[in-house]
Image: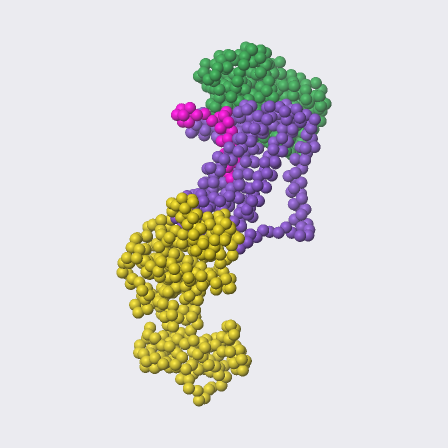
Chain colours: A green, B yellow, C purple
């Protein structure tokens, strides 16, 4: 029950990335066959860069929008390649990789989860931090409750949701609260950052402490409020090629794109900051 | 053949009670019209308190529908229903003073015999203790006191039937309906239960209507028979009268008579399709002639010197054992059923297809007006 | 899944004695036995794997943690409450579907089963949109009665009932269809109103079906995750049921998650086995 159920659930839960995750899962099942076939076809066609086949990228849920964009760019630049994403909670992804999931690239939302993979000896080389993410308060559109600081969230009449301590955004929020010496009782510890954000999008909660990228991605459905304590809880996002990557060449090329100026531009637009 | 008969009750044979169509001060006065697709039931019933009326008819004749209409379980499409002078047409079943004994009793399987019987009084407002006391009295009266605590599945068929009767009676109905009350019983229990039921029905002070396809049940239990065929009453009257003077083949068959219809002229009745039967009665006009199969004598050769006035040439169509006798179905000049002893059948070397002569004495026939 | 053999016997016409199928003597035929055993293995193997991989050494520590007991207690309370809610409104609904002819009955029956096919998370979102603070109905509950359901224990019960009730309705409706409606007629001729007939005759007759449906609903409610976390959120002691605790434990400590799953499994098996002996086999 544990693994498959967990994966399915995770897939269903990342509401924002539901479709993408579905795609990723269905592609996963036939990735081996796919990459083989495409590699052959591509080499006979004599592509200019010799890159071909499917690359499987396991990426943190918060990277959904920007990585999907980068994936498209990559496929355009290298015809014959296909980037398949599996977006999810970094912990679940790390657990999947250490259990032998066929992934080429792992982009995690926290060094801690990356450490799980490196400790297991599954990473090829040393992971590199490619972006940072910082927390922001997501409020209802127009900020009707006039939230201006983390301290404003501690009022009794506000319904605030946080991420659970077990997921990176929750751990970061705790860190920020501790730094500010604040005690905040939310109505719910959400299981991931998208769920926390969705509670505000659906107007069930008045505010959520989430990543700036998530606030950006939600557009005008929420309003972001920056707070200084967020600086104490910046999240590094490491990325690495995996040791057992079925398609290491394309994986490496994808990582290069992510770390290039162009990649950084897409990521910065999404709200990430440079390392 | 039955058109002239339906809904008409010959006044001579009527059991004591109000006449048809005359508003009854007490008892049942009903014309039940139920239309369901192509089937139409149109039955007129009336009975005085104390009467036991049997609705007799073949399967599918509409007897059970009539019973359900009386109980209010199917709505009337037309007609009327009065009980003790009160209109019940629009009264829902739970408010009718009607008790029903269903064919397979429908005792509530989760309740004891006592609670089954107490169900009615309880629903009609008695306290739990009081309804149980009443139920206990009814069980006592029907000889079931020892089984009060038993669940229905622990009861024998006969006991279950009596519990069902007690349950129906416990609400003090002014109309008691019994749907094939003995059909679910085996032959031996049936005899016992029939006798007991007859006693209980005789004691019952209001109207009882029972539905059955078994003429014996009808004759033993009821003092007035209503024969229903295809949704209509084809004959009614006292059981003895119907047994003697059947008016349809179905009834004749039920009571075991050969029945013919024709034009009487003196001591003969010319049947519609040719043959003539000599009878003891002196009648003129449309008439029935009936005689029992036992009145028929069979001969292998044309009999000479017989005093029998009726002689027909027939052929054996079929043979079957009927108790200790053989029933021969004959075709030919006159289709008829004949009963003879096994010995006689052997002596005559009867077999299907055998040619025989049948004689019937005029004194053993019975002619009556149409 | 709908009518147990006992139901059939109780509902059918009286036939003298209870007839129960006797177990086959001798061997079962191979074409049945082999797939049956494969089926059993398929269902049991993952549980066995859980047992094999369970961190037995850390079990005592887990079992003494207040958070676990809190979540377990909340799970049992909410699943039971959700089952009760399902029974109170689900049994009449099943009766309506089984006994009353009305236009569009087929469609209504399909709608009732909708939560079965709806991914639970979507069910949770749908509940938010209906009963949430900003929901179609919820906004009135909020402004008129000051009643908010999301992030409350009541919300957990509602989410679980939403997902679990179809099991009960389908089970009870099947039993009702198999039950002889003439018992209700018999009751009305004895003076019972239609409601009394239902309460005193039909309900006891279909009790085994209700029990079976309730057990199914309870089990489904106990394991409910998606609709619960979406509609009611996750707060220890208030809305964090065992499945939520298990899921979050998976994020950081898979071993603890396995252990928690085992606790949930053990409790539910104990309860279900106990109920089965008491309810389902009682005549």
Front-lying residue, B163 or C137: B163
Front-lying residue, C236 or B334: C236
Quarter of the picture holding the N terminus of chain B: bottom left
Count of number-bearing discs: 0
Residue B244: % across, % down: 38, 72
Quarter of the picture holding the C terminus of chain B: bottom left
Q: Measured along the vertical axis of the image, is residue B33 above or below residue C277? A: below
> At x 63% / y 28%, what residue is drawn?
C260
> At x 71% / y 21%, what residue is drawn?
A119
Residue B305: % across, % down: 44, 89
- The answer to whether residue C114 of the structure is visible from this angle is no
Q: Measured along the vertical axis of the image, is residue B136 above or below residue A119? A: below
Residue B133: % across, % down: 43, 48
Q: Residue furthest bottom?
A: B305
Question: Where, by quadrant of the figure, is residue C221 drawn?
Answer: top right
Question: In screen coordinates, is B159 left or right of C66?
Answer: left
Question: In screen coordinates, is A1 left or right of C120?
Answer: right
Is residue A46 one of those drawn in magenta?
Answer: no
- The answer to whether residue B285 of the structure is visible from this angle is yes
Question: In screen coordinates, is B287 left or right of A245?
Answer: left
> At x 53% / y 47%, what residue is drawn?
C7
Front-lying residue, C190 or A234: C190
Majority SS type along the magenta span: helix
> At x 45% / y 76%, what residue is drawn?
B293
Is residue C164 one of those drawn in magenta?
Answer: yes
Front-lying residue, A152 or A31: A152
Question: Where, by quadrant of the figure, is residue C71 drawn?
Answer: top right
- Which residues are the magenta region? C140-168
Residue C24: % across, % down: 65, 51
Q: Residue furthest left?
A: B22
């Amino acid at each position: 029950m544990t693994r498959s159920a967990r994966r399915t659930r995770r897939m269903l839960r990342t509401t924002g990335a539901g479709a993408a995750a579905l795609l990723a899962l269905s592609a996963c099942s036939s990735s081996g066959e796919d990459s083989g076939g495409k590699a052959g076809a591509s080499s006979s066609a004599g592509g200019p860069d010799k890159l071909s086949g499917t690359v499987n990228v396991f990426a943190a849920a918060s990277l959904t929008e920007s990585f999907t964009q980068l994936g498209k760019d990559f496929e355009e630049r290298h015809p014959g390649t296909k980037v398949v994403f599996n977006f999810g909670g970094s912990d679940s992804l790390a657990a999947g990789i250490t259990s032998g999931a066929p992934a080429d690239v792992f982009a995690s939302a926290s060094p801690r989860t990356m450490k799980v993979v490196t400790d297991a000896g599954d990473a090829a080389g040393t992971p590199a931090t490619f972006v940072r993410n910082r927390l922001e308060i997501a409020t209802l559109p127009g900020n009707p409750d006039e939230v201006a600081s983390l301290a404003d969230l501690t009022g009794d009449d506000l319904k605030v949701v946080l991420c659970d301590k077990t997921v990176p955004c929750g751990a970061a929020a705790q860190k920020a609260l501790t730094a500010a010496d604040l005690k905040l009782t939310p109505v719910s510890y959400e299981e991931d950052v998208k769920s926390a954000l969705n509670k505000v999008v659906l107007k069930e909660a008045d505010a959520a402490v989430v990543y700036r990228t998530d606030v950006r991605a939600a557009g005008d459905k929420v309003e972001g409020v920056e707070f200084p304590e967020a600086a104490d809880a910046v999240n590094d996002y490491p990325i690495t090629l995996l040791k057992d990557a079925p398609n290491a060449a394309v994986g490496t090329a994808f990582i290069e794109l992510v770390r290039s100026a162009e990649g950084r531009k897409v990521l910065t637009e999404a709200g990430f900051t440079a390392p | 053949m039955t058109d002239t008969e339906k809904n008409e009750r010959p006044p001579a044979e009527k059991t004591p009670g109000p006449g048809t169509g005359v508003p009854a001060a007490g008892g049942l006065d009903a014309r039940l019209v139920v239309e369901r697709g192509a089937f139409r039931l149109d039955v007129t019933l009336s009975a005085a308190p104390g009467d036991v009326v049997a609705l007799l008819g073949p399967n599918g004749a509409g007897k059970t529908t009539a019973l359900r209409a009386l109980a209010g379980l199917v709505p009337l499409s037309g007609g009327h229903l009065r009980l003790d002078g009160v209109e019940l047409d629009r009264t829902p079943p739970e408010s009718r003073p009607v008790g029903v004994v269903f064919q397979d009793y429908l005792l509530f399987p989760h309740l004891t015999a006592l609670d089954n019987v107490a169900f009615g009084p309880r629903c009609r407002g008695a306290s739990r203790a009081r309804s149980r006391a009443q139920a206990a009295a009814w069980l006592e009266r029907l000889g079931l006191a020892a089984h009060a605590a038993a669940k229905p599945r622990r009861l024998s068929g006969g006991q279950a039937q009596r519990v069902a009767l007690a349950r129906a009676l416990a609400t003090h109905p002014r109309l008691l309906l019994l749907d094939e009350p003995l059909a679910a019983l085996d032959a031996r229990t049936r005899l016992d239960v029939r006798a007991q039921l007859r006693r209980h029905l005789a004691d019952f002070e209001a109207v009882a209507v029972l539905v059955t396809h078994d003429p014996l049940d009808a004759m033993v239990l009821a003092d007035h028979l209503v024969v229903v065929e295809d949704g209509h009453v084809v004959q009614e009257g006292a059981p003895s009268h119907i047994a003697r003077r059947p008016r349809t083949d179905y009834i004749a068959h039920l009571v075991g008579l050969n029945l013919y219809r024709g034009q009487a002229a003196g001591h003969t009745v010319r049947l519609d399709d040719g043959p003539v039967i000599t009878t003891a009665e002196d009648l003129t006009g449309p008439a029935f002639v009936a005689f029992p199969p036992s009145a028929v004598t069979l001969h292998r050769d044309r009999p000479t010197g017989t005093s029998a006035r009726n002689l027909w040439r027939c052929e054996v169509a079929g043979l079957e054992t009927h108790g200790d006798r053989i029933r021969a179905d004959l075709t030919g000049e006159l289709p008829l059923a004949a009963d003879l002893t096994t010995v006689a059948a052997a002596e005559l070397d009867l077999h299907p297809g055998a040619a025989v002569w049948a004689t019937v004495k005029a004194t053993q026939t019975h002619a009556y007006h149409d | 899944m709908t009518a147990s053999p006992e139901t059939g016997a109780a509902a059918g016409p009286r036939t003298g004695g209870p007839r129960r199928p006797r177990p086959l003597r001798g061997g079962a035929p191979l074409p049945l036995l082999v797939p049956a055993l494969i089926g059993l293995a398929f269902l049991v193997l993952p549980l066995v794997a859980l047992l094999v991989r369970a961190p037995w050494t850390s079990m005592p520590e887990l079992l003494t943690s207040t958070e676990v007991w809190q979540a377990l207690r909340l799970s049992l309370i909410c699943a039971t409450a959700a089952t009760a809610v399902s029974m109170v409104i689900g049994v009449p609904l099943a009766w309506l579907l089984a006994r009353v002819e009305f236009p569009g009955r087929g469609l209504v029956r399909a709608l009732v089963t909708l939560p079965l096919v709806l991914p639970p998370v979507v069910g949770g979102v749908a509940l938010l949109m209906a009963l949430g603070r900003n929901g179609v109905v919820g906004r009135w509950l909020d402004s008129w009665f000051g009643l908010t359901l999301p992030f409350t224990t009541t919300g957990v019960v509602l989410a679980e009932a939403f997902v679990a009730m179809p099991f009960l309705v389908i089970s009870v409706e099947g039993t009702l269809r198999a039950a002889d409606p003439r018992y209700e007629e018999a009751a009305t001729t004895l003076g019972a109103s239609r409601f009394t007939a239902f309460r005193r005759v039909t309900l006891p007759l279909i009790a085994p079906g209700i029990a079976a449906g309730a057990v199914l609903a309870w089990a489904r409610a106990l394991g409910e995750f998606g609709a619960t976390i979406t509609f009611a959120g996750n707060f220890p002691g208030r809305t964090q049921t065992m499945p939520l605790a298990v899921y979050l434990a998976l994020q950081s400590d898979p071993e603890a998650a396995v252990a928690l799953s085992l606790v949930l499994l053990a409790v539910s098996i104990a309860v279900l086995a106990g109920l089965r002996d008491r309810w389902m086999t009682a005549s």
